[in-house]
Image: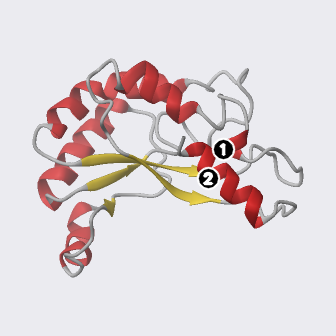
Amino acid sequence: WAGQLKPLFDANPGMDWYELENECDVSDAAWYGIYLTECCRILDRPLVIKSEYIGRNGPPPEHPDDPNAWSLIDFFRSLVPTLRSLRAQYKLALGFHAYTAITPGELGALVGLSDEFRGYQWRKIWREVLQPAGLGDMPVFLTECGDGWGSGGFTPDQIIASMRAMDS
């Protein structure tokens, strides 16, 4: 994968950050650590790790009582040694999506204005995993946002308010 991305990245040297993947569906932290290490070695540039699906199989659960609801936190705990090692040599950031906390066809709350489970689980990862591990300065980027599943019902001002809440 990194070998396929390298020519594209090399052709665009003025970028501040490069997104490594989008919605990478992997639940094995050991494998992902090896993959990430090789991508950093091959690409050797600031990378945004797309974190939406990693740590579980499939999209993020919609409810905190889902058995896999907090698996992403466990995944990042397992990934801490790799992130520490890579951060000594490479610039890494986390990327995530901020859509509505809804199921298809239902209108819910915008992620940035919803509860900790869906809207703020990235802060929970930062507070409970990255910060105590000395990785609290790792940038976090909002790489996609909106009302999700084309459900509509939110105004641009509400979406902007949600984005601002995510940044606070």
Query: Where is residue 151 shown, x and y percent of the image?
Result: 84, 61
Kind of residue at badge 2: Met
Residue 63, numbered label: none
Query: Where is residue 160 shown, x and y percent of the image?
Result: 67, 59
Q: Mark 2 points at which residue?
A: 163
Crowding around mark 1 (Cα neighbors within 10 Å: few <14, some 14 to 19, many 20+) is many
Residue 59 drawn above or below residue 48: above
| Mark 1, secondary structure of its residue | helix
83 or 3, nearer to the observer: 83
The answer to whether residue 13 is visible is yes
Query: Where is residue 30 shown, x and y percent of the image?
Result: 30, 30
Disc 1, disc 2: CB below 8 Å?
A: yes
Query: Where is residue 20 shown, x and y percent of the image?
Result: 34, 58
Give the image's coloring scheme: secondary structure
Residue 36 drawn above or below residue 19: above
Left or right of residue 116, residue 147 in this image: right
Residue 7 drawn above or below residue 54: below
Report the label total.
2
Crowding around mark 2 (Cα neighbors within 10 Å: few <14, some 14 to 19, many 20+) is many
6 or 125, nearer to the observer: 125
Kind of residue at badge 1: Gly
Residue 112, numbered label: 1
Res 130 → quadrant: top left
Q: Earlier in the sequence, mark 1 or mark 2?
A: 1
Q: Distance between the residues labelled 1 and 2?
A: 6 Å
